[in-house]
Image (cartoon, rainbow, N blue to C red):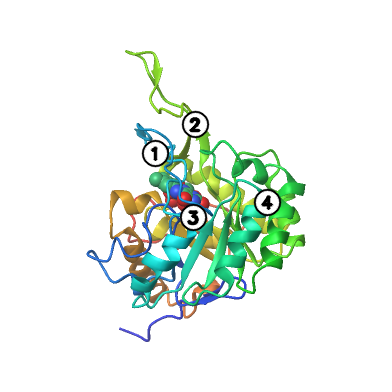
Amino acid sequence: MGALPELSVDIGGLKIKNPVIAASGTFGYGDELAPFYDPSLLGAIIVKGLSLRPMPGNPPPRIVETPCGLLNAIGLANIGIEAFVGEKLPSLATIKAPIITNIYGHTIEDYAEMARRIEGVKGIAAVEVNISCPNVEQGGMAFGRDPDSAARVADRVVENTTKPVIVKLTPNVTDIGLIAKAVEAAGAQSISVTNTFLGMAVDVATRRPKLANMVGGLSGPAIKPMALYLVHEVVKAVRIPVIGLGGIMDYHDALEFLLVGARAIQVGTANLVNPKAAIEIVNGLTDFCLREKIKDINEIIGALETKGEDHEKKGDRKDKSKANF
Ligand SMILES: Cc1cc2nc3c(=O)[nH]c(=O)nc-3n(C[C@H](O)[C@H](O)[C@H](O)COP(=O)(O)O)c2cc1C
């Protein structure tokens, strides 16, 4: 075996050892998957979305499986920022991967206050700002659907912290590039794309919605092509790093996002299907680079080829490890 490829990437003020990040809400408070593998091996871990005060979330049922996807309406059930910092964070100190908090607010001032509370806390490497949750009545996605309010949230968070700020966008908009530009202008260091797509499921026998909240957010393989497109759009719109996510199940999916220009990727629903999914993606990317003689993963980022030879001839460069590539 040759020398190991360089996998580290810079996601806007935060250098991570590989581009694979655990997505918020699918990795608990950081160490729930530790029985399956050492979470230190991941590029970073984003913990469950936190709010200023604890939130019970929505009533059950709040998760429904759909073909190739998952519809959730958790409603940001969480223990609140104080309990996270006091009770959970200390036990995460042994994890040698950056811990990123994901924050949510009912008001713009809530976001600013969360940023202030996190600012002095050691062990939190960056802040991901969720302006894209479809499952809460107030705040969340409402901020992420309007360029002005998205920018105001980003601005207030950036103003109140020296930690890198990642803003997580909603796909449920007409022009995601517009929102991305507004957030970049407000000073965000990077952008993650995407949160879940609004969706519904109905039980025909009872004639009732399958989710108590009626509406939920769709994630998993069902959304991958749409998420990939949105990442492509945002990469074109901004200069700051974009972190891609949405339906990434294996290293091959991860490569698609990197090729369209995502600087790193997040693994969400896949963790719920296969607890080892994220680490398998790290290993898959390493093996891919070795096989393809790629010395540095950054060579792949944004390397989508759109000109030149026709698609048929390019078949020669197929990744032979994947039958249906
Ligand atoms: C059960 C569940 C809970 C989630 N909770 C959060 C959350 O607290 N904050 C957040 O920003 N995103 C949350 N998400 C969204 C994911 O982080 C991710 O953006 C989305 O699921 C798309 O990626 P995926 O298809 O890889 O899961 C949640 C998703 C699921 C499935």
Res. 247 visible in picture: no
Q: Is residue 116 above or below residue 137?
A: below
Residue drawn at the location 71% of the way across and 60% of the way down: 156
Which sits earlier in the primary sequence, circle 1 or circle 2?
1
Residue drawn at the location 50% of the way across and 52% of the way down: 53
Secondary structure under tag 3 reads: loop
Q: Which mark is residue 50?
A: 3
Res. 36 visible in picture: yes
Q: Which mark is residue 199?
A: 2
Q: Which residue is mark 1?
A: 69
Extreme bottom residue here? 3
Residue drawn at the location 69% of the way across and 38% of the way down: 174
Q: What's the amino acid at mark 2? A: Gly
Which sits earlier in the primary sequence, circle 2 or circle 3?
3
Q: Quarter of the image containing the N terminus?
A: bottom left
Within 10 Å of disc 3 (Cα), the crowding (few <14, some 14-19, many 20+) is many
The Cα–Cα distance between marks 3 and 4, rounded to whole angstroms, is: 15 Å
In the picture provided, is 144 more to the left or to the right than 292? right
Q: Is residue 255 above or below residue 44?
A: above
Residue 33 percent coordinates (x, y): 29, 61
Residue 231 percent coordinates (x, y): 59, 53
Which sits earlier in the primary sequence, circle 3 or circle 4?
3
The Cα–Cα distance between marks 2 and 3, rounded to whole angstroms, is: 23 Å
Which sits earlier in the primary sequence, circle 2 or circle 4?
4
The Cα–Cα distance between marks 2 and 4, rounded to whole angstroms, is: 26 Å
